[in-house]
Image (tube, rainbow, N blue to C red):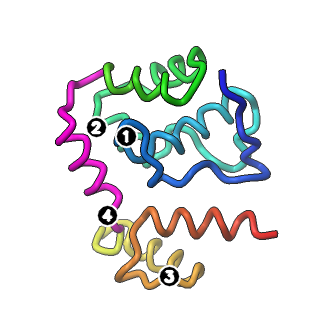
Amino acid sequence: MSTALDLSKESPRSPGVRLRDYVIIARTIDKCRGLLSGTIGDYHYNCPLDQMLFSFKGIDSEDFKKAVETADQDDDVALWFDQAGIHKTQHEIQEWSDDVEASSLYDHPEKKEWFISECQRLGLDPAKATLFQLLDADDADTFKK
């Protein structure tokens, strides 16, 4: 298994990092490895962002965790993910990833207030920021040196 990051000292990869064209997966792998090794810090595995990834393929978080636990490399997890659950075409994967990467919570009725507040705290324009930009900015803010 690849070495886990110490997520109490550094952030997981950006949700925009793609493996086999899936967004979110690299970050989810980092958090899962952190959970398995006890170095997850304040991050959460199987959070709503991870669940977006799992839902897209119809994958259970426990099955994903087993794949991470037994895989030697990220590519092994991504290949397992690609072959598990609901079959998706390359076009469907690309379209889903592009849509998720461009998404914002600005127009989400239940999350808009939180999103605006977090964007303002991080110096982002809530009307233009994506969720991924917010997460990247929050990671950078958390681990400022």
Q: Is residue 65 above or below residue 135?
A: above
Spatial CA span between label 1 and label 2: 5 Å
| Residue 52 magenta | no
| Residue 100 magenta | yes
Amino acid type of the residue tagged 3 in the rendering:
Leu
Which residue, given by chain and number where applicable, does mark 1 sit on? 53
Residues tagged 4 and 1 counted as in contact (Cβ below 8 A): no
Spatial CA span between label 4 and label 3: 15 Å
Quadrant hosting residue 85? top left
Amino acid type of the residue tagged 4 in the rendering:
Ser
Mark 4 or mark 2, earlier in chain = 2
Q: Is residue 18 above or below residue 88?
A: below
Which residue, given by chain and number where applicable, does mark 2 sit on? 56
Name which residue lies at 75% across and 32% down: 38
Which mark identifies residue 124?
3
Spatial CA span between label 4 and label 1: 14 Å
Across and down, in percent, residue 115 comes to 45, 72
* Furthest-top residue in this view: 70
Left-right relation of 102 to 51: left
Boundaries of the magenta span: 85-104
Work out which quarter of the rendered image holds the C terminus and state it: bottom right
Across and down, in percent, residue 143 comes to 74, 63
Which residue, given by chain and number where applicable, does mark 4 sit on? 103
Name which residue lies at 50% across and 78% down: 119
Residue closer to the observer: 107 or 8:
8
Mark 3 or mark 1, earlier in chain = 1
